[in-house]
Image (tube, helix red, strand yellow):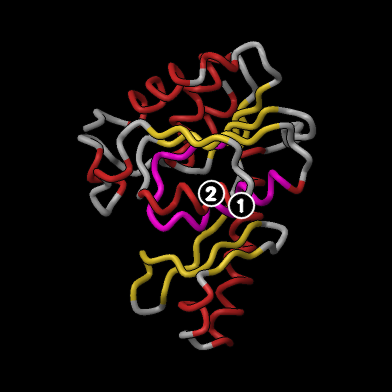
Amino acid sequence: MLKNRNEAGKLLAKTLVKYKDDRVVVLALPRGGVVLGYEVAKALKSPLDVIVTRKIGHPNNPEYAICAVDEKGSLLCNELEAKSVDPDWLQGEIERQQKEAKRRIALYRGKRKPAEIENRVIIIVDDGIATGLTIRLAVCSVKKQNSKKIIVAVPVTPAESISELKKEGADEIIVLEPPENFMGAVGAHYLQFEQVEDSEVINLLQK
């Protein structure tokens, strides 16, 4: 059991110290992932940036992701689930979440330029993986930008997500807790799992 996101980030950082002298960029998925990403970037003395992918939840169960979309409109779906919903509803939701991704990037990054990804070792950090669609899309996006190596670093994930991340292009996946012990929800692995506010994300990115 993890105490909180800060502790999880520090524990991940310890597993990543071997990359300290490489040209590393840490990309965190907001909002929760930025707390962990900050700890990793601080330990490795590396740049920290956000990578925003938005989940599209099933209309009957919004917490269950059936697709993920980024600010450029790149899309990754659970094909079976996506075909089971109304296509007009899905298209509207894709457009809405793409706009939200753009809004969040502008909010979090402000006037700062995006981090350089080409020929860099990229560490993608989140506070945990549930369905895995959002972080898989993040891996796809980074892969397209000619990164040198992609490492996914998360405290918890279901076992099936590991093979899926490798298919998308992740070179290495670091997980703190054994995937076979995944409890069905990311928050179940933390003693403290409060919602992270936008103001905290902005503050961490500006440090």
Q: With 161 as the anchor, is 137 left or right in this view?
A: right
Q: In which quarter of the image is residue 91?
A: bottom right
The vertical placement of 49 against 30, above or below, is above
**For the N terminus, which image quadrant?**
top left
The magenta-colored residue range is 124-143
Residue occupied by mark 1:
168
Dot 2: element = helix
Q: How crowded is mark 2: few (under 14 residues within 10 Å), some or many (20 or more)?
A: many
For this orientation, the residue located farthest to the top is: 21
Q: Which residue is drawn at 36% across and 25% down?
A: 6
Q: In this rendering, is residue 139 above or below 19?
A: below
Q: Is residue 133 magenta?
A: yes
Image label count: 2
Give 54 or 138, whichever is nearer the viewer.
Answer: 138
- Looking at the rendered structure, the secondary structure element under dot 1 is helix
Residue drawn where x is 53% and y is 67% of the image: 67
Q: Give the image quarter of residue 21.
A: top right
In the image, what residue occupies the spot 59% across and 25% down? 206
* Three-letter code, disc 2: Leu
Instruction: Identify the amino acid type marked 1.
Output: Glu
Residue 137 inside the magenta-drawn segment: yes
